Amino acid sequence: MSKQLHNRSQHSATARSETGLSRREAIQWTLIAGGGLTLAALSPSSGSAQGTSVMGASKASSAPFAPNAFVRIGEDNVVTVMCKHTEMGQGSYTGLCTIVADELDADWGQVKAEGAPANAALYNNLMWGQAQGTGGSTAIANSFEQLRQAGATARAMLVSAAAQEWKVPANTITVEKGVVWHKPSKRKATFGALASKAAAQPIPTDVKPKDPKQYVYIGKRVTRTDSPAKVNGSAVFTQDLKLPGMLTAVVAHPPRFGAKVKSFDGSKAKAVAGVVAVVSIPSGVAVVARDFWSAKKGRDALTVEWDESKAVKISSSELLAQYKTLAGQPGAVARKEGDAAAALAKAAKKVEAEFVFPYLAHAAMEPLNCVVQLSKDGCEVWNGEQNQTGDQFALASVLGLKPEQVKLNQLFVGGSFGRRANPSSDYVLEAAFIAKALAGTEHGSAPIKMLWTREDDMRGGYYRPMYLHKVSAGLDAQGQLVAWQQRIVGQSIIAGTPFEKMLVKDGVDMTSVEGAADLPYAVANLRVDLHSPRPGVPVQWWRSVGSTHTAFSVETIVDELAHLAGKDAVAFREGLLSKHPRHVAVLKLAAEKAGWGKPLPTLRAGERRGRGVAVHESFGSYVAQVAEVSVAKDGTFTVDRVVCAVDCGLAINPDQVVAQMEGGLGYGLAAALSGKITLKDGLIEQSNFHDYPVLRMADMPKVEVHIVPSTEKPSGVGEPGTPVIAPAVANALFAATGKRIRTLPISTADLAG
Amino acid sequence: MIRLNVNGKQVNVDVSPDTPLLWVLRDALNMTGTKYGCGMSVCGACTVHVNGSPMRACSTPVSAVVGQKITTIEDIDKNAIGKAVQAAWRKHDVVQCGFCQSGQIMAATALLASNKKPSDADIDAAMSGNLCRCATYVRIRAAIKDAATGLK
């Protein structure tokens, strides 16, 4: 999600209510219990919060020692950390456990992660006000102090229990790697042995977390908590869930967005062995069967007539033409300093460019899916859940339930990149509508596992929007940057969502302009404006949101300006970043480690080589990357090596920071090389990985990651590695070929030479 | 009834013969370590071994593997190479979301079974059919090389 969401963390429900929420928003965001949530999560009454693991009650929920919403210690000596953030690959479970384990002085081997249930009063994202959810690279950033406190409090109670047991002063007791010691008398006890007694201690309210110098795990390498289960096939994703009596549903969706079912003939589908029902739901026709293959065959046999009277029938080429027209007209102003137009008119040298960015699918490896079971008491959901509170309220609303009657169970997520935090709860509601359509039939209480095929997922919408940027920038006679004018055209992600009042200001969706409106480079005359057309294609945040496009235009234009000024690309940037020392630090570190300025050896005879740099801040983390490319005569190229520097404040799990930089830049590189969703008369032209190619092993560069040592508070790393790679590669391609990249994905034909 | 040899055991399944092996494993045999990712052999998440060779279970009708030895991620630790690959995966913390990793491990195990000392180009060739959207490729490469060092 957006940086603005992240930055607005301090805004409370009160602040939002002053903005005048619509009824829907009020339902979504203010009916949840009021203030004091952090306290609630750390209060003794929250000990009853029950985590649920797959298929049954959590072991942790029966642990005798549950001093707060996050820590469970059983007599079996297992420390369970209730993780309020989704594990979708970004290492959140490992990071959250690391913080607790360190404050608790637990042994890493005794620590287990468990997905917390939906309960915004206990598990809200502190950067999202009252809502529970994962996004915007906030998991560690918002949890750090909360979990330090949770761990330190639990530790203090274990110490009190031991002091009572051994009749010694608490300050003579030490805790090391899961063992509580009274060293003078050589007595020791495990956490498990003390758990019951610790539970009887009063909960202290004045516990101070550790001096950072005492950290045992934070800042060092720990192994991922989820590696063993993900290496032997036992990790349970939504796709894998098995429940007694469960049925599988596959949905026939309309071929065009906005179309509805007019009529359907399910007789042939019902004749397929294993198919038990065919039902109409708001988003299409669902075929429900004993297993996936029967459901899929049933769907193949289905005949549906669609009402396309309100369907989207536009083509990408038409959209681009519309966007180009809009780019010629002033838009809603996102940022204005000085007089950019006047300064441009007087500039000694100018750069003018138009950039085109396509729609992008998230295309996580696990296609969307969700399990829903209805009962007389409510609704239970099993899902790789990223948007607990939004989904809980949306489900309650369509099912006529109270939010607390909607129980959400957290499963591993096979990648999301933003998609599973859908502001309309699209796929979660679809599963619920299938279950609802079966209510009152013999299958009314069966758990329904809705599975999307890859094609459903690719064509299901909620894409990173298509954008067009028009940028003009000027230098004075001394090569100083004097003017920057940037017009952005593209759909608003936030319009029509519960976040609109927070994040759309005076017609400007902050997530459309983030990364440009907050341009870090010093320029006296700056104008960034925006058009937000509404062609009806569903759009959504995609790993790093606005930065996915703004980092590209900004960082390639800055590179071009450096070239125009006859200056080194690193030195030119540095000269404009005097107020941004953290940008400078990563820039210089990446440049130094990459051997910036040294000649690049030829890797393959006849190929042109080039090195390019880009630097960008998103979600409070700073990333610079230097890319090295080799370009063949026909324009095809390889990205051979990427050196990445990151400043994310205190690195809780340095190895996971490295992993997120590697993976994040790989995700961004996939989009730069081949990511493109296009519409033809409203139909999505791509369907699967053969026509929406993504990064493969042979495309992956060598990656070196360097972390800037920092004592700043931790910021996120899930997204900030992604937006920097495309401009770094484009700048490297310029260095190799003299050609500028204006359109993504990169066309190799343009690089022949 | 269709009789299969899965992980060294004979099992009977009551499915239509055109059912892909993937859905037989997942839905009929409750072996869910093998994943559905694309359904058309382009992502590798469903990779299993048939007589030791990697095969895409999503596009292999179950009728085609009757009488063949099918091995899945659930049993790959019985194979010395598979066990070494899994250990290397843990050592390097290769996984992120983890959804593709069963297939990656099956592909890597098959590679090392036929080539004990793969070069980067060999790894590219053998592993390029296995997609990872988390782009854990740097670590997959490192883990394969690490696993290879322990093989005789």
Image (cartoon, coloured by chain):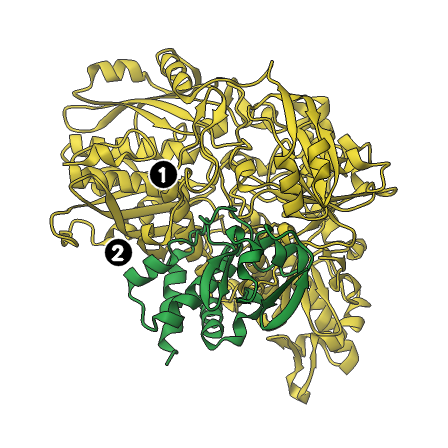
Q: Chain of mark 2?
A: A
Q: Is residue A733 left or right of residue A49?
A: left
Where does label 1 land, which residue?
A: A674
Q: Colour of chain A?
A: yellow
**Residue A197 spot, x, y in % from top left:** 80, 73
Which element is circle 1 on? helix
Furthest residue toward left:
A606
- Secondary structure at badge 2 equals helix
Q: Which residue is mark 2?
A: A593
Q: Is residue A122 visible?
A: yes
- The quadrant of the picture occupied by the C terminus of chain A is top left
Residue B11 versus residue B19 in the image, above or below = below
Mark 1 falls within which chain? A
Q: Image point 34% across, 35% down: which residue?
A: A745
User: Where residue A293 sits: x, y (%)?
Assistant: 63, 47
In primary-sequence order, the first of circles 2 and 1 is 2
Left or right relative to A392: residue A724 = left
Q: In the rendering, what colour is chain B?
A: green
Which quadrant of the view contains residue A568?
A: top left
* Position in image of residue A275 (x %, y %): 72, 42
Q: Is residue A534 something one can see in this rendering?
A: no
Residue drawn at (32%, 49%), measured in percent from left and top? A585
Q: In this rendering, is residue B2 above or below A341?
A: below
